Image (cartoon, helix red, strand yellow):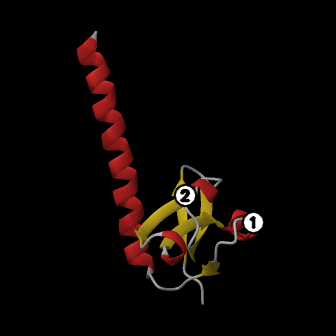
Amino acid sequence: MQTSITVTIGQANIRYVLGVTSAPPEYDGFGTLTLYDAGEGRERQRYVLIHDRHEDWHRMRYSSGLFAYQPSDALDERTISQQLYDAIYERFSAQTQLAAAKGDDE
């Protein structure tokens, strides 16, 4: 069974599914988020959250580069939620620091 999580932003509810791929991030699209990335090359195992409406597109995109993709249930919803929170926090913090640095230059 594939793990999924629903993210609510305002009134929008978006369902993401968990998958594992050997593809590099350059093959991602449509707001895909990497939760874990281990290994290199064809041995890479990258756990990704994909908007459920775009899973078929990703499956074809990854396979176009001869990379593997499979739905996954390796992580539970609580772990995914924490990883998603951490990723959002990290991106927000980086943007805040960049904005502050630009403000110091002026």
Query: Residue 98: which numbered mark, if any?
Result: none
Q: Is residue 28 visible?
A: no
Q: Position of residue 27 (x, y in %)?
A: 63, 58
Residue sitting at the far bottom: 1
Tell how many labels: 2
At x 55%, y 62%, the residue is 24
Instruction: Please state which amino acid type lies under the numbered disc 2.
Output: Pro
Q: Position of residue 104 (x, y in %)?
A: 23, 17
Q: Is residue 37 visible?
A: yes
At x 33%, y 26%, the residue is 99
Query: Residue 25: which numbered mark, if any?
Result: 2
Residue sitting at the far front: 41
Q: Are dots 2 and 1 in contact, CB under 8 Å?
A: no
The mark lying in front, picked from 2 and 1, is: 1
> Which image quadrant: the C terminus?
top left
Q: Quadrant of residue 15?
A: bottom right
Please indicate whether residue 65 sits to the left or right of residue 93 in the image.
right
Q: Quadrant of residue 49?
A: bottom right
Instruction: Please state which amino acid type lies under the numbered disc 1.
Output: Ser
The residue indicated by pointer 1 is: 64
Please indicate whether residue 55 sits to the left or right of residue 5 in the image.
right
Secondary structure found at label 1: helix
Secondary structure found at label 2: helix
Q: Of callouts 2 and 1, which one flags the residue occurring earlier in the amino acid sequence?
A: 2
> Which image quadrant: the N terminus?
bottom right
Please indicate whether residue 95 sits to the left or right of residue 77 in the image.
left
Compute the Cα span from label 2 to label 1.
14 Å
Q: Position of residue 40 (x, y in %)?
A: 45, 70
